Image (cartoon, rainbow, N blue to C red):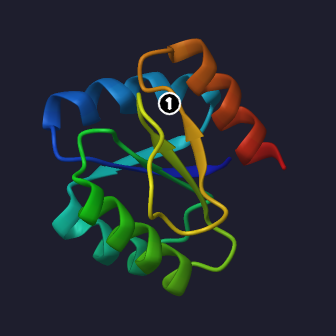
């Protein structure tokens, strides 16, 4: 069973997104930005989902920390607009299209 860490600043969005992500059959945990790196150090995750509620600086910093700490953990950034200045290899997906999010998550956790 894949493990997903959903990271965001809005607790309501985190709860809603976790419920949606569980539809993929994955084990889902949620964390606010300040706790995300610590969570990554305690458990191996296959995918980190960065919410569009994160500030650009936080998203970039968290993505860099994930790459440094978690070899093989894929990163998915949810956004309405293109995100600039993030680390290479990070997938992007619309935060407002649940069906697209589920397809993307399934693809990333099965490959």
Name the residue beneath numbered marker 1: 21
Q: Nearer the viewer, residue 92 or 51?
A: 92
Instruction: Decide if residue 110 is on the left or right side of residue 19.
Output: right
The correct choice, above or below, for 35 with respect to 101 in the image is below
Q: Quadrant of residue 59?
A: bottom left
Residue 60: image location, x then y, percent: 37, 66
Residue 103: image location, x then y, percent: 69, 24
Residue 86: image location, x then y, percent: 47, 63
Q: Circle 1: is it few (<14), some (14-19), or many (20+) Cα within 10 Å?
A: many
Q: Residue at x 17, y 68 (%)?
A: 34
Mark 1: which secondary structure? Answer: helix
Instruction: Decide if residue 107 is on the left or right side of residue 93.
Output: right
Q: Residue furthest bottom?
A: 68
Q: Nearer the viewer, residue 62 or 111?
A: 62
Instruction: Decide if residue 63 is on the left or right side of residue 100.
Output: left
Residue 48: image location, x then y, percent: 50, 55
Q: Residue at x 37, y 29 (%)?
A: 17
Q: Residue at x 33, y 73 (%)?
A: 61
The correct choice, above or below, for 17 with respect to 2 in the image is above
The correct choice, above or below, for 56 with respect to 106 in the image is below
Q: Residue furthest right?
A: 111
Q: Nearer the viewer, residue 104 or 83?
A: 83
Q: Residue at x 52, y 44 (%)?
A: 27
The correct choice, above or below, for 59 with respect to 26 in the image is below
Q: How many numbered callouts? A: 1
């Amino acid at each position: 069973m894949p493990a997903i860490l959903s990271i965001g600043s809005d607790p309501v969005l985190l709860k809603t997104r976790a419920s949606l992500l569980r539809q993929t059959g994955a084990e889902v945990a949620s964390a606010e930005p300040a706790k995300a790196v610590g969570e990554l150090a305690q458990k191996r995750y296959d995918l980190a989902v960065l919410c569009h509620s994160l500030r650009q600086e936080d998203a970039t910093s968290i993505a860099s920390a994930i790459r440094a700490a978690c070899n093989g953990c894929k990163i998915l950034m949810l956004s309405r607009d293109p995100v600039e200045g993030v680390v290479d290899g990070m997938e992007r997906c619309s935060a407002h299209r649940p069906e697209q999010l589920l397809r993307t998550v399934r693809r990333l956790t099965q490959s």
